[in-house]
Image (cartoon, rainbow, N blue to C red):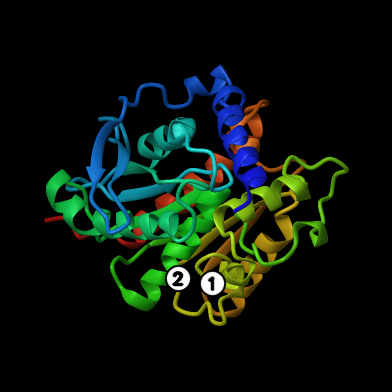
Amino acid sequence: MSLRHRLLARGFQVLAGRVTRPPAAYDAFAAHVAPPDRVVVPTDAGPVTVHVYRPPADAPGTGGAPPVYVNLHGGGFVARHPEFDGHICRVLAAETGCVVVNVDYDVAPQRPFPVAAQQAYAVACWAATTGAREHGWDGARLAVGGQSAGGNLSASACLRARDEGGFGAALQVLVYPPLDLAQDPGDKHARTAKPLISPGLARLFNHSYVVDPARRADPLVSPLHASDLAGLPPALVVTADLDLLRDEGDRYAERLAAAGVPVRHHVAPGVDHAFTHVEPTAPTRDLLDVVVAEVRAAWDRTARPAG
């Protein structure tokens, strides 16, 4: 990776930490959920810290061990701020009765592909097995999801789990994900003159995460390039109306459905990429209602008989 690209990526990391924190209005979302515990998960790609949110006493549930949702934050594979997804994690815990494991995976350019993808898969495997035994949730009732780069990592982890095992997912939640890093961002189409993710910014993210262009068509980098999507978990695919990345998410939803995967495709109207982390908060709350409904349905499908 060139020094110029490395400096630009590092500059974005610093800027993201200063100016992209969700507005204070999001602090009110499920504010009664306790702050998360921190657990370190050993993986072959290095130790990974996860933030574990527990459902409050008034959360819905059927008794017994709660299900678990593995959340992967966004940030273009470059920014590292899992705490920025706190409002999403709290709502999922409070309104679906699950434990949420929010993953602080390593980012580029310091640790490029395949590190984040390996860590995402390994943490989901841990949540289904060792984590469930040691921390008291039900690893057989698991969902994985994320926003932006986290949606990419969620799709990648589900593809790998289908082919290698390691975990079974009741649902994958892919929120405005980049799913085709092989296509030049300049050839992508946004429905607004100044999209939040510009072609230049997308190129910086892609180049930071996968330096070799020849590797960007790997399905674990670009899930849209997978030759076969059959056998994947049920999916909620969310695309943002104005987003530069919308078309690849739309196509992925179409391909999942064509492959026989149960899929709900929701296009969030009138919003751009990352709308879940900016004001106004109403579109985020509307989307979370959709996500909560799909996650609850997944828990209902996998509920264990009483007793």
Q: Which image quadrant: the C terminus?
A: bottom left
* Mark closer to the chain start, 2 or 1: 2
Identify the secondary structure beneath mark 2: helix
Amino acid tagged 1: Pro
Question: How many labels were placed on the picture?
Answer: 2
Residue shown at 19% from the left, 48% from the top: 65
Give me the disc on residue 219: 1
- State the CA–CA distance, disc 2 to disc 1: 8 Å
Residue 222, located in which quarter of the rendered image? bottom right
Which residue is identified by label 2? 159
- Is 187 rendered above or below residue 28? below
Across and down, in percent, residue 256 comes to 57, 72
Give whichever of 22, 283 is nearer the camera: 22
Answer whether residue 64 is visible to the viewer in this image.
yes
Within the image, what quadrant is residue 182 found in?
bottom right
**SS at circle 1:** loop
Residue 198 spot, x, y in % from top left? 77, 45
Q: Who's the residue at 25% across and 61% down the image?
A: 140
Q: Is residue 139 above or below residue 256?
A: above
Q: Is residue 297 visible?
A: no
Q: Badges 2 and 1: C-beta atoms under 8 Å apart?
A: yes
Residue at x-position 31% and y-position 41%: 50
* Front-lying residue, 126 or 55: 126
